[in-house]
Amino acid sequence: MSSTDKIREKFEKQLAEFAERKDEIEEKALEAISMAKIKIMKQSPFFASLLFKLPAIPNYSIPTMGTDGLILLYNPTFTANLKRKDVVFVLLHEIEHIVFKHHMRCPVNMKSAQSLHDMYNQNEIKDPFLKAQLEEISHILEKWNIATDHAINLNIKYNIKIEPTEFLVRDVGIKMDDKWRETPSEVIFKNLKDCDSGNQAENMGVGAVYPVGFGELDPIEIKDAEKELESNVHAAAAMARKAGKLPGGMEKVINDLYTTTTPWQDIMRTQISTIVSKMNYTWSRPNKRYAQHLADFGVIMPGLYGEEYADMYFVMDTSGSVSDDDRAILVSELKRILEDYRVRIHLIYCDTEVKGTPIVLTQEDIQDGKLELKLKGYGGTDFRPAFEYITEHLDEVPTDMVIYLTDMEPNTWHLGPEPPYSVYWAVLPHGDQSAEPPWGVKIQIELEK
């Protein structure tokens, strides 16, 4: 064997050893993230629901973790060496960046920044003015990351009641000054002393926040991403409220940041997609394969059952205050839902009482592109009979979701205890937009013919 061959063999062996260690590290890091998610699921289903929708992608170019709201980047070496409680804190840190819309509230227009960057690189003689602008953008991004870190780390500490470990405080350099408690990120950013822009890794703290899409999305794509986030947050919040586990302070955040302008159809379809995706699972038949999760973490995983359709209830307010035009448009939306999803809709007409038995609708009820319904009612408004009927028949028709289409003008708001399923109030434009139901999620809708 020649000297050249020996050298080549030596380096190939070293490369193989590195690849083997790399695979081991990445596997350990991914396992750490998965176990931390299970831990969060038990403590906070709100954050867990959002985390499970976030693809985790390894990236060795960042020192810790980071997110742009669409993906979660993590350095496998950093993650693999963390204790589980540290991984829990860092994951909560990243998902709170998203919930607080820090990736969308960034004070830098990344499209413009990218254009500046391209202009600078295309010039043979580097323009010092462009260079100064790019340095200023980098400085603003780092300062924004520090400001938002203070806000969410303090929220995790005081509202979710999880303290960062000494390792995160001392070795990673977590940003968490008590003087910024309950202070909006923009206010912290404005009053924060200038950071050292030459030490970007240190200024990342336990995890960075990047502009949505890393500056590569156009305004329409950003708006679509925001709509999807709003739908996901509303769905996660509804699930957490039902379990009595919506974290402290999150109700205010949702009210402040998620007074949504998302079309009601988009929100409803997000929730329906969630129901349909679970139609082959049931919590009443736990999955024995994951029995150890119950012993270790108190978590039950659902088992499979064979249903062709996912069941859900629509309650249509047929009181006299709801116009025929509104009802016609709502019937049209029912048709579109049936066309798009394998659902079995149990439609209830209700004014001061339930009008007969529910009408069961599936895709087969759409004939020649039309859904024909004979509406009943036109009396006063009382929500209670519909919920009493649904609750009484849960054994016959198990459901996770009820959508109530109404003008929010009942005879009484004394509705009794919260039912064991999610309730979405789809409020008609001419209805009482200020009404606050005692439970459920209110969605202010706009109808277009």
Image (cartoon, rainbow, N blue to C red):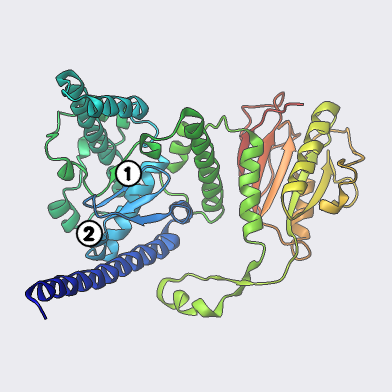
Look at 47% across and 75% down and name the residue there.
294
Q: Element type at marker 2? A: helix
Give the x, y percent position of residue 219.
Answer: 47, 28
Give the x, y percent position of residue 256.
Answer: 46, 32
Q: Residue 78's mark?
A: 2
Residue 364's place in the image compared with 448, above or below, is below
Query: Would you say 245 lies left or right of 29 here?
Result: right
Residue 82's place in the image compared with 117, above or below, is below
The residue type indicated by label 2 comes to: Phe
Give the x, y percent position of residue 244.
Answer: 51, 54
Q: Residue 155's mark?
A: 1
Look at 71% across and 32% down and name the residue there.
408
Look at 62% across and 35% down and name the residue there.
443
Residue 293's place in the image compared with 353, above or below, is below
The residue type indicated by label 1 comes to: Asn
Q: Element type at marker 1? A: helix
> Which is nearer the eye, 241 or 77?
77
Query: Would you say 62 lies left or right of 441 here?
Result: left
Occupied quadrant, residue 149: top left
Q: Determine contact: label 1, label 2, CB under 8 Å.
A: no
Residue 434's place in the image compared with 210, above or below, is above
The quadrant in which the N terminus is found is: bottom left
Q: Which sits earlier in the primary sequence, circle 1 or circle 2?
A: 2
The quadrant in which the C terminus is found is: top right
Q: Nearer the viewer, mark 1 or mark 2?
A: 2
> Which is nearer the eye, 289 or 199?
199
Measure how far apart labels 1 and 2 are at the Cα level: 24 Å
